[in-house]
Structures are given as C-alpha cells and as structure tokens.
Image (tube, rainbow, N blue to C red):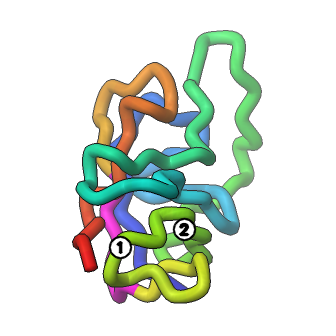
C-alpha cells in the first residue's frame, strides 16, 4: 500500500488531507509529465453531496495507475512509497494531478 496525501479539498472523499476511499485511480495513459495526470476517483463536494460521516481517512491505500510512463507504475499499480495528489480547488478530475509522477 502507498502512503497518500491529498490536498484536493473540493473532493467528497477528502478528509484532513487524506482520502476516505479504499483505493483511487490515477489517470494519464499517455502522460509524460505530472500535469497530464489526474485523479479519476475525484468527485466534487457540493452542498447537496452526501458523505458518509463514518468514513475514515486512510493514509495507506491502493493506487491503481494508468500513467504507464511513470517510473513508479508497475503493472498499473503505483509502487511509490509516498504519493501526493494535488488540485486544491478542483471542480473536476482534470484539475487534479499526481504530483509524485516522474517520467521513466
């Protein structure tokens, strides 16, 4: 499992800079830089959004990754020790990115 920090405060899964999902998907099949990646699991938090109040942030979770050009991608799983998802005020997944991405 990867240690994940997430600063995407506008995502419904974010709590205290951690993700409450059991796993996420980083998209960016043709990515050659971090700006070409995104968190495909992003879901915008809105006033009418329902969030399970009992969800617990998890700093260690599975990160599936389609960014095969990243040095940490091993058979579509992220093998970095620590991953950072950024996109502080994102309104959709394209405004997020895997800040840990490093080109092969």
Q: Is residue 87 above or below residue 16?
A: above
Crowd around label 2: few <14 · some 14–19 · many ≥20 (10 Å): many
Q: CA distance from mark 1 to mark 2?
A: 9 Å
Q: Is residue 79 left or right of residue 98?
A: right
Give the structural element (helix, strand or loop) at label 2: strand
Q: Residue at x 54, y 68 (%)?
A: 65
Residue sitting at the far top: 47
> Residue 28 location in percent, x, y?
47, 52
Q: Return the residue nearer the eye: 64 or 84.
A: 64
Q: 89 or 69: which is nearer to us?
A: 69
The percent coordinates of residue 43 (x first, y second) are 61, 33
Q: Which residue is mark 2?
A: 65
Measuring 65% from the left and 66% from the top, which residue is drawn there? 23
Tell me whether the residue at label 1 lies in contact with that at label 2, contact meaning CB atoms closer than 8 angstroms: yes
Q: Quadrant of residue 63?
A: bottom right
Q: Quadrant of the C terminus?
A: bottom left
Q: Is residue 35 left or right of residue 13?
A: left
Q: Is residue 37 above or below residue 50?
A: below
Residue 51 on the magenta segment: no
Q: Which residue is mark 1?
A: 70
Secondary structure beneath dot 1 equals loop
Left or right, 8 with respect to 12, comes to: left
Residue 38 - label: none
Majority secondary structure of magenta residues: strand
The residue closer to the viewer here, 94 or 46, is 94
Q: Split into 4 quadrants, where in the image is the N terminus?
A: bottom right
Q: Could you classify mark 1 by the number of other residues whose Cα lies within 10 Å: few (under 14), some (14-19), or many (20 or more)? A: many
97 or 13, nearer to the observer: 97
Q: What residue do we see at 50% from left, 48% from top?
A: 39
Q: Which stretch is magenta? A: 80-85
Q: Earlier in the sequence, mark 1 or mark 2?
A: 2
């Amino acid at each position: 499992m990867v240690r994940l920090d997430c600063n995407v405060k506008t995502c419904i899964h974010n709590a205290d800079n951690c993700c409450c999902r059991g796993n996420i998907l980083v998209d960016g099949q043709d990515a050659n830089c971090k700006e070409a990646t995104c968190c495909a699991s992003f879901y915008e938090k809105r006033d009418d959004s329902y969030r399970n109040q009992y969800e617990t942030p998890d700093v260690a979770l599975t990160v599936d990754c389609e960014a095969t050009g990243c040095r940490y991608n091993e058979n579509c799983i992220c093998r970095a020790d620590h991953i950072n998802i950024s996109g502080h005020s994102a309104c959709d997944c394209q405004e997020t990115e895997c800040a840990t991405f490093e080109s092969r």
